[in-house]
Amino acid sequence: MAGWGSTKTVRARQMGRVLERLDRSGLSLAEFARREGLVPSTLAWWRHVFRRAERAGGGLADSPPAFTEVRLAAATDPIAASGIEVVLRSGHLVRVPAGFDPAALRDVVSVLERLAPC
């Protein structure tokens, strides 16, 4: 049986998907909760539960890693064509070429932040 604040219950998996939508939305927690008809404190509590589990090396153990297809547009500006590199707190390095899709980058970063540190 899963304990209080477990990330392995059916409800936790549901709330994990809601939090992923929140991350992708670009909205504040309060704005997202209002839009979805949810209680902001419930979202904040679940976010705390998942962050605590991530720090402890847990998370949604039964969930496979999510992947997002990234398609890049051709860069016309030679300076912008070099792109950028982003180093996440987890130690993962993301090379972002010019013309990237910001929503796809948010999805990739969200997935990498949930993985174990390098």
Image (spheres, rainbow, N blue to C red):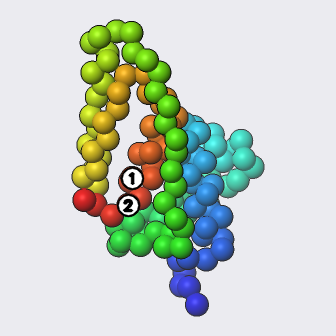
> Where 88 sits versus 43, above or below?
above
| Spatial CA span between label 1 and label 2 | 5 Å
Pinpoint residue 69: horizontal percent, then vertical percent. 52, 41
Circle 1/circle 2 CB separation < 8 Å? yes
Task: Please state, as top left, top right, bottom left or bottom right, where the C terminus lies in the image.
Answer: bottom left
Q: Secondary structure at mark 2?
A: loop
Pinpoint residue 110: horizontal percent, then vertical percent. 45, 49
Check disc 2 and give the amino acid type. Leu
Regarding residue 45, the answer to whether it shows in the image is: no
Instruction: Using the image, tell me which numbered label, if any, was put on residue 112.
Output: 1
**Residue at position x 27%, y 21% in the image:** 82
Residue 32: name its quadrant. Answer: top right
Q: List the residue tagged with mark 2.
A: 115
**Residue at position x 35%, y 32% in the image:** 96
Residue 41: name its quadrant. Answer: bottom right
> Where 54 sits versus 73, above or below?
below
> Where 8 sits versus 50, above or below?
below
**Residue at position x 56%, y 85% in the image:** 2
Name of the residue lying farthest toward the right: 37
Name of the residue lying farthest toward the bottom: 1
Check disc 1 and give the amino acid type. Leu
Mark 2 crowd level (few <14, some 14–19, many ≥20, 10 Å Cα): some
> Which one is nearer the viewer's eye here, 112 or 8?
112
> Which one is nearer the viewer's eye here, 7 or 103?
103
Instruction: Using the image, tell me which numbered label, if any, was put on residue 14.
Output: none
**Residue at position x 61%, y 77% in the image:** 9
| 42 relative position to 68: left or right | right
Name of the residue lying farthest toward the top: 77
Q: Secondary structure at mark 1?
A: helix
